Image (cartoon, grey):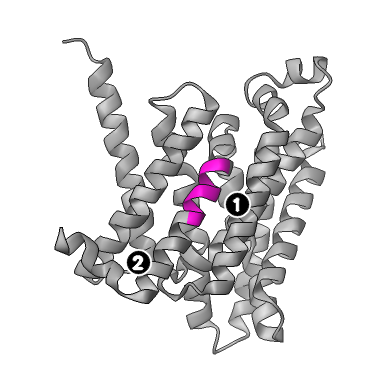
Amino acid sequence: MQWLLEPFGVSFVRRALVGGVLVSLVCALVGTWVVLRGMAFLGDAVSHGLLPGVALASLTGQSILLGAAVSAGVMVAGISLIGRSPQLSRDTAIGLLFVGMLSVGVIVVSHSDSFAVDLTGFLFGDVLAVGPADVAQLAVALAVAAVVSLLGHRAFVALAFDPRKARTLGLRPALAHAVLLALVTLAIVASFRVVGTLLVFGLLIAPPAAAVLWARRIGTIMLGAAAVGCAATVLGLVVSWHGGTAAGATIAAVAVVLFFLSALASHLRGRPA
């Protein structure tokens, strides 16, 4: 057991563990709705759409977190606006904004010779550099996500499974969808400093997808996703410590591996003897 506990004898690894667990919990709450609603492409687009705001904030000396939030807000508002057109599907709107925002971000980055390291951190995060301020921000994001998920549970369930029935019941599916978009934005903005925009998507999708294969109740799916995400954080930090690999990327990779193991076990369970 010494090899398992050894990494956590170092203070910055313990902080990384706390940050990773908080990210896993936030992503479990929000990612469950993303998986059930079929919003994976949207989550991927929003995570990449942060680049212009982060780049501009970094170049001008402003808060990176604020720049990411503004950029994500513009992305979500643009998707909602374009998606209202009867001639265009929501996927088309997402694809257009995805490419557009990413292009703007790359153009901004190309004007700076010193942004390469910051861009690497933006894409892949730095979980080993988690500080008290990051932990506090993640704790607040977790609290907000938990409260919103609890208050909007009935509307979110109806929206995920039958939007027409949600409208019939007066649950205002358009508002529920907008709140879900805000939750996705919150999870990505709060987490990208820890695992990066490319890797937060893995924690947002893989643990809930692994839990969906075994659970039928939404609360159980969330608990299962939280367990998978936390396990991926612990195992990822241990593998990273002993293998000398990038911690954030290793955590995301372990989460994806756990999903495939869950899918394989589910398949074997369902196969007749």
Residue at horizontal 33 percent and vertical 69 percent from the top: 246
Residue at horizontal 75 percent and vertical 34 percent from the top: 176
Instruction: Residue 27: say if magenta.
Output: yes
Tally of numbered discs:
2
Instruction: Let me know if residue 146 appears in the view.
Output: yes
> Does residue 86 sit above or below 92 in this rendering?
above
Quadrant occupied by the C terminus: top left
- Front one among 226 and 172: 226
Quarter of the view holding residue 58: bottom right
Q: Given the image, on which type of amino acid does mark 1 rest?
A: Leu
- Front one among 255 and 113: 255
> Does residue 170 sit above or below 110 in this rendering?
above
Q: Which residue is mark 1?
A: 142
Whole-percent x, y for residue 240 in the image: 27, 66
Please report whichever mark, 1 or 2, sits nearer to the chain's N-terminal start. Answer: 1
Would you call the spot at circle 2 few (<14 residues within 10 Å), some (14-19), or many (20 or more)?
Answer: many
Whole-percent x, y for residue 148 in the image: 70, 41
Where are the magenta residues, as a range?
22-29
Q: Which residue is mark 2?
A: 247
Quadrant occupied by the N terminus: bottom left
